[in-house]
Amino acid sequence: MRRTFGEVVAVDGISLGVPEGELRAIIGPNGAGKTTLFNCIMGTLSPTEGDVYLSGTAITDEPEERRPHMGMARSFQSNQLFTDQTVLENIRVVVQTTRQGAFSLDLLRSHYDVGRERAIEIAEAVGLTGDLEAEAKNLPHGEQRRLGIAMALATDPEVLLLDEPTSGMSPSATTQTAELIEEIRDERGLTVVLIEHDMDVVLSISDRITVLDRGSVIATGPPDAVQENQAVQDAYLGGMREEL
């Protein structure tokens, strides 16, 4: 896959295959192409060259809003939450939208109970049952990130993309979120791909790691092998702003 912005090459010939059920981390410095790659996978951006496949089917031409219905979801960011609505309502509206195939804010105001039990089950899975009636804007940062993961799970994905899920969290919240990601993968049988800067998280939960530098893949392998990879060491010693 290749993605350019004028003369700038953000993604340069990346070929990335993730087996079903794997937890894959993508690491690299700011500007390495990680988020652009995610945006191409989810349909937020179209690749300049190349295709995106899901379970062997090309989905490159499918619009972004269709991809959750096809089994691919990306965690909701804090600015995508319905901040004036409760945790339960945030999750339930995604459940309803996925099942009904159409979105309306009227769903949030409805007393119709479609998806309520499912929403509660998802909230329990991410540790938010004590906050069901709390408005999203009043949640601590870490719990807002958990809510974003819950909303992605509400689409019943086969593949879950997480963009820096522990960013801005305290050490204890980071540990809890890393454990949550492992539990989600193991209990739901999902394929998980995450961008993450916290190397303790990456090394502790990943089956394999893909390292990007300047838009290209420079290494892929198990955590131990990536740590020992000479190209990775050279790239990091050469000025990457993250540390192994």
Image (tube, rainbow, N blue to C red):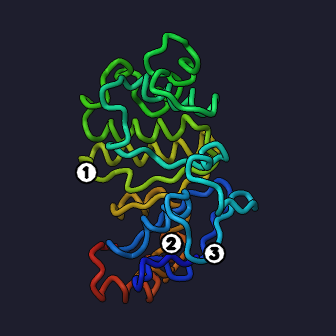
Query: On the picture, is 20 further left or further right than 12?
Result: right
Which of these two is toward me, 18 or 204? 18
Query: On the picture, is 9 further left or further right than 64?
Result: left
Instruction: Give the amino acid at mark 2.
Output: Thr
Query: Which of the two discs, 1 and 3, labels the residue nearer the N terminus?
Result: 3
Instruction: Give the amino acid at mark 1.
Output: Gly
The image position of residue 100, as x and y in percent, is: 63, 28
Name the residue beneath numbered marker 2.
210
**Residue visible at 61% across and 76% down?**
15
Instruction: Give the amino acid at mark 3.
Output: Gly
Question: For the residues marked 1 and 3, what is the alpha-carbon distance in whole angstroms?
Answer: 34 Å
The image position of residue 4, as x and y in percent, is: 47, 78
Name the residue beneath numbered marker 1.
168
The image position of residue 176, as x and y in percent, is: 37, 42
Query: Which of the two discs, 2 and 3, labels the residue nearer the N terminus?
Result: 3
Secondary structure state at the residue bearing disc 2: strand
**Residue visible at 34% across and 23% down?**
131
Which of these two is toward me, 181 or 165? 165
Name the residue beneath numbered marker 3.
50
Secondary structure state at the residue bearing disc 1: loop
